[in-house]
Image (tube, helix red, strand yellow):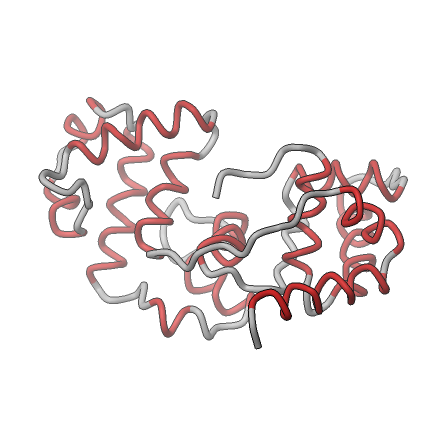
Amino acid sequence: MSISTDSDQALGHLAQADPVLARLIAQGRPIQPSAHEDLYLALLRAIVSQQISTKAAAAIWRKVQALFPPDGYPEPAALLLLTDEDLRAAGISRQKAGYLRAIADFAQRDQLDHTYLSQLDADAFTAHLTQIKGVGRWTAQMLQMFALDQPDVFPEGDLGIQNAMKRHYGLEETGRALLKRMTAIAEAWRPYRTVASKYLWQSLDNTPAE
């Protein structure tokens, strides 16, 4: 099946299943498929980007790459040799330095095999990645949605998704009640919850950096 045919099928399903999404899709820009990425690199970048602006994250990532001449690729063995001071000079906090090393160690033990991980369902993928210190459920979901471009992931804990669904579905619940209601609404979107989520982010003009 071609990408365009698959995309048309997803949009057709979502528009038919949910009138709110039908409106957002009609008003929005087409969502382009994500390129499949190096999961190790995507994880490192996700940790660098945590809790800082996209612009700041990009600047720090360039400094991190400069620590790995000539091509800027942070091979796990090379990353594990860096001290906290080396990483601190690139703008990485001591806590994040520990997380980056944990990812490098995981990769060095051949635990980030793209072929294997891309075949796991959402729960198994999340359980595998959250063994790494510093990697939580949200980060695992972002990798599934963007690095692997898996079609049916719903990040109910994401603040942007919560805000978009509150706005467009008139949800007034909070806490667990909100998550339960959101998850129930999203059931109708299966097997294309990733695409639906990307249109919800787009409706806020707040799509996360891919």
Identify the residue shown where x is 66% and y is 32%: 205
Work out whether 124 lies above or below 77: below
Q: Give the camera-side residue of 29 and 124.
A: 29
Q: Is residue 64 left or right of residue 117?
A: left
How many tags in the picture? 0
Identify the residue shown where x is 62% and y is 50%: 31
Q: Is residue 154 left or right of residue 62?
A: right
Considering the image in quadrants, where does the N terminus appear? bottom right
Q: Position of residue 78 (x, y in %)?
A: 11, 46
Work out whether 87 lies above or below 175: above
Q: Which of the 4 quarters of the picture holds residue 171?
A: top right
Work out whether 123 lies above or below 185: below
Q: Position of residue 2 (x, y in %)?
A: 56, 72
Q: Which of the 4 quarters of the picture holds residue 70?
A: top left
Q: Position of residue 52 (x, y in %)?
A: 45, 26
Identify the residue shown where x is 50% and y is 58%: 144
Q: Give the camera-side residue of 137 and 112.
A: 112
Q: Position of residue 48 (x, y in %)?
A: 36, 35
Q: Is residue 65 left or right of residue 180?
A: left
Identify the residue shown where x is 73% and y is 61%: 11
Q: Which of the 4 quarters of the picture holds residue 194?
A: bottom right
